[in-house]
Image (spheres, helix red, strand yellow):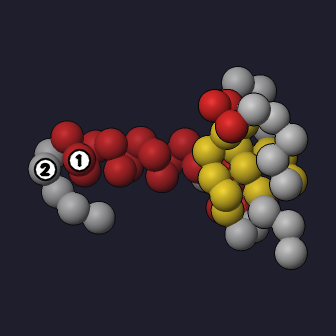
Amino acid sequence: MPEYWYNVNTHEIEEDAMSDWSQLIGPYKTREEAEHALEKVKARNEAWDKGEDD
């Protein structure tokens, strides 16, 4: 089963991590989850800034 990664430099979804690990967020089980990677990161950062747990 493939894993999907979000590349923060190219803003593209990669199947099975083709780029350097420092450029990737993931892994995600589906392409759709990977497409929303930055939204999840932003929400977690905002919650952390407020002192909330996920």
Estimate the x, y position of residue 42 in percent, counting from the top left: 41, 42
Q: Relative to residue 47, is residue 1 drawn left or right?
A: right
Q: Residues within 10 Å of mark 2 (few under 14, many from 20)?
A: few
Check if mark 1's residue and mark 2's residue have beta carbons within 8 Å. Answer: yes
Q: Quadrant of residue 45?
A: top left
Check disc 2 and report the residue beneath it: 51
Q: Relative to residue 36, is residue 13 drawn left or right?
A: right
Q: Is residue 34 above or below residue 13?
A: below
Q: Quadrant of the C terminus?
A: bottom left
Cα separation, mark 1 vs mark 2, equals 5 Å
Estimate the x, y position of residue 49 in percent, counting from the top left: 19, 40
Viewer-closest of 28 and 18: 18
Estimate the x, y position of residue 4 in percent, counting from the top left: 77, 57
Q: Which mark is residue 48?
A: 1
Q: Is residue 15 above or below residue 30?
A: above
Q: Is residue 11 visible?
A: no
Q: Is residue 49 visible?
A: yes
